[in-house]
Image: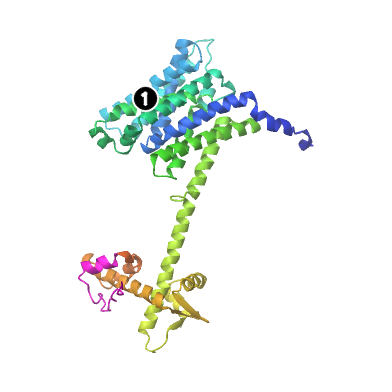
Amino acid sequence: MLLAEFDFTDWWIRPFSDRWWQETVCSMLVGVTCGVLGCYVVLRRMALIGDALSHAVLPGVVIAFLITRDTGVFGLLAGALLAGVLTAVLVGAVSRLSRTKEDSSIGIVFTALFAIGIILVSALPRGLHFDLSCFLFGDPLAVDTADLVLMTVICPLVLGIIFMLYHPLRASSFDPVVAAAMGIPVIALHYLLMGMLSATVVAGLKTTGVILVVALIITPASSAYLLTNRLGTMMVLSGIFGGFSAVAGMTLSFVTNWPSGATMVVFAATIFTLVLLLSPSQGLLTRWLQRRRMRRHIQGEDILKTLYRCITSNAQVGVHAYSIERIYPAARVTRRQGERIVSELEHEGLLFRQDSNIGLTEKGTERAIEMVRSHRLWESYLTTHAGVSADEVHEQAEELEHVHDLADKIDQDLGHPEHDPHGEAIPRPPKTTD
């Protein structure tokens, strides 16, 4: 019955109405601007001051409303800019003139200004109405042509300033001390950034509200930060993520009647979650796979080393293969892990299998000798340079032996020792032929 009453035509056509286009374009411009500007907020570790600005502009907006008696965006923008600059100045003054740390100063200033703004709203003369809920949470239905015009001015202006001042902003973001020594006006750039943040917050008032606009500033930039180490690429990705979150959130909110600002932020948070899991360099899943691959590599080297020790210490000449039931416990791997690792080592040509026995190939013997040499060199190094006793050095060398790239350097530093602290011979590296 419910399916029969549902109007699929309205479901598809409604999001693409004229009003949808106006509100979506405005939201997209807000998302792109927030995303690009957010890169500098993230790099400068200013997430808290970004949140502070979004709240501290309230008294400036209310005072502008009292003066103009109008909710026109240009008047509110002027008030917000003044409040934003005042916030930055007060935070710096409190930090500089007292023993209060910067994060505490931010908390003091923005809560005080926000409280003043609430008092001003409650004390408005009778007949004047300021929609505080619209200020806090946004109201896309209130977006009009003036808001769209404002964003078509602010977005190119902010992006243009960032493009023109790219090198000074980059230098002051990564190392403000060096930037100041180079003659870059670090303090002026800081206040310029605060002004652009304030303008962007006001521009996003009706689409997301001041509470959620912070998420569009921080979340897309954080997602891009996990994907690249280049600032230019980070800014492009962050702008794309912010714009997409705004468009997708606005479209879904039209279909479902969900709050548009919250829906945009959910999309931005979803993108961040996917990036956090799947980022090629810093993703949780990627790092888990790398750790898993490294653990299996170490276990494989332990199996090769254990086989080599069994072969070299066995009194029965000519025995080159040993039962897996003996090797696996000695190498500290389970049977399930061992079977999988042995298959990989066999595929690499490092060992061979004879029924339930395994043995080393020539290539596997060379790798095992390399491991034994690394282990005994690390034991010698730890007892000589780190003061570790010979009785305790074995376990530490068991972990460090897999860093065999340093074996030649340690061998040289120790003067090419022939025996380890336990009297065992240290194998010489295989001779290379041209």
Viewer-nearest residue: 372 or 134 = 372
Q: Residue furthest bottom?
A: 316
Residue 212 in view (yes/no): no
Residue 205 appears at what percent x and percent y?
A: 50, 24
Residue for badge 1? 87
Is residue 234 positioned above or below 390 on the image? above
Judge left or right: residue 414 versus residue 49: left
Give the prevailing secondary structure in the magenta stretch: loop
Residue 411 among magenta residues: yes
* Mark 1 neighbour density, 10 Å: few (under 14) some (14–19) many (20 or more): many
Secondary structure at numbered mark 1: helix
Q: Percent position (x, y) of residue 230?
A: 39, 42
Tell me which residue sits at (25%, 67%) in the image. Answer: 410
In-image side of 372 versus 267 (left or right): left
Q: Is residue 178 visible?
A: yes
Residue 183 among magenta residues:
no
Along the viewing direction, whichever of 356 and 61 lies nearer the viewer:
356
Colour setup of the view: rainbow
**In terms of image quadrants, where is residue 322?**
bottom left
Q: Report the span colored magenta.
A: 406-434
Question: Where 234 falls versus 280 (above or below)?
Answer: above
